[in-house]
Image (spheres, helix red, strand yellow):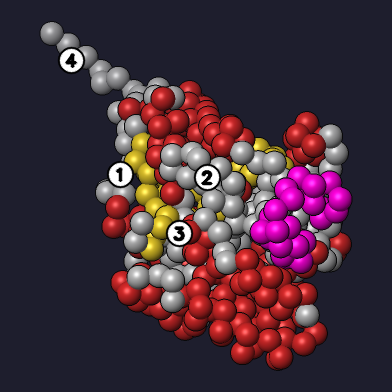
Amino acid sequence: MEPMAQRHHIYLIPGFFGFANLGDLKYFGHVTDFIQGELRSRGLDATVHNVHTSPTASVRKRAIRLLQALIETSGDSGPIHLIGHSSGGLDARLLVSSGASLTEDLPADDYARRVQSIVTVTTPHYGTPIVSAFLNLLGPQALRLLSLATIYILRYGRLPLSTLVSLGGILVRLDNVGAGQDTLDQLYDELLSDFSDDRRREIRNFFAEVGEDQSLLNQLLPAGMDVFNACTRDDPDVRYGCVVARARAPGVRSTLQAGLSAYAQASHALYAVVYNLAARMPKERVPMPNWAQIQALRAAWGEVPDLRANDGMVPALSQLYGEVVAAVTADHHDVIGHFDAPTHDPPHYDWLTSGSGFQRKDFEKLWSNIAAWIVAGVVAKAEAAPAPKRAARRSQ
């Protein structure tokens, strides 16, 4: 069967604290249908799957969940392509790493060898310093509240202004988190009370799983990713591509771009806090970009960003791995469709007001580029494959 005629399986892997679905709330809600249409318009018969993963479990446990998803949904044959947002890209890399010992109970090699390409989207390949704040200062309650706030925004479009202001104030007072623990719990309960009984039950179950294992936090530190990269080997038969994003550094320009409403300004203030936390990347932890990556970054931004540049969660230079599929001005959740476009059908709701200016046209261009990159690899692989041998004719 010709490679383009085969059924291809595309897996969307959520990142840190990433739920796949909570009822009608979908992490990749805007991505799934769009990229499937883009792939099919380019002649690729593709089915897109959303992976249900353990939100803050170790990369190894998350990679096992990914493997289970492949076993359950990809059938016995057909090429596989993995697209991981944030730490989801690390799950994909570990799955195909030669010599990786995931589990003895599942046939990891049988599925890993079917993987043709991996696209990592704003993935912290060399770590992100923001997790140190959560580990040492904010604690589990703050992480839980930040994740619930994201879920709340996807459901209702925005947080209550009082909650947003309170959350920002707590994050600013990083040296006095103990005094804010009661406030964190109160804000969490207030947000949760706005959901239906069934949805509250789903959310509680989700956070119960988060509470069971938070190993991922330590692993995403720059020092932890140094060990990960030393032990994880690329598969030479897999194409690796990356999407790199940086948002505007907080300042006068980003503040004006955010808008003049009280909500937008409060949201932007919270964005400024997380941006500055992510800007503390140690120089020795990030390798120099290669020449092709430098050219791609210059073509997109006119320069190679410095270590401080980030998307509100992950330093831009930490996102580089393999070929640069796209470099965009966006924040960490803009790239998966969580930006401000409430009149679109279905509506887009912004994670935080970063002032990046990322809109639906940018989203469509980004995911069209990802689809084109995947298809180009399939075509190149088919052209490079040796022609099948014809059976010798029998003499008459």
Viewer-nearest residue: 179 or 236: 179
Viewer-nearest residue: 19 or 202: 202
Residue at which label 2 appears: 342
Instruction: Report crowding for label 3: few under 14, some 14 to 19, many 20 or more residues within 10 A (C-alpha).
Output: some
Query: Which amino acid type is shown beneath numbered disc 2?
Result: Pro
Q: Measured from the top left, where is residue 342 in percent x and y? A: 52, 45
Residue at which label 1 appears: 77
Q: Of callouts 2 and 1, which one flags the residue occurring earlier in the amino acid sequence? A: 1
Q: Of callouts 1 and 4, which one flags the residue occurring earlier in the amino acid sequence? A: 1
**CA distance for labels 1 and 3:** 37 Å
**CA distance for labels 1 and 4:** 32 Å
Residue at which label 4 appears: 394
Residue at which label 3 appears: 155
- Kind of element beneath mark 2: loop
Name the residue at the left extreme.
Answer: 396
Camera-near label (2 vs 1) is 2
Query: Which amino acid type is shown beneath numbered disc 1?
Result: Ser
Camera-near label (2 vs 4) is 2
Look at the image and give the residue range highlighted in magenta.
249-274
- Kind of element beneath mark 1: loop
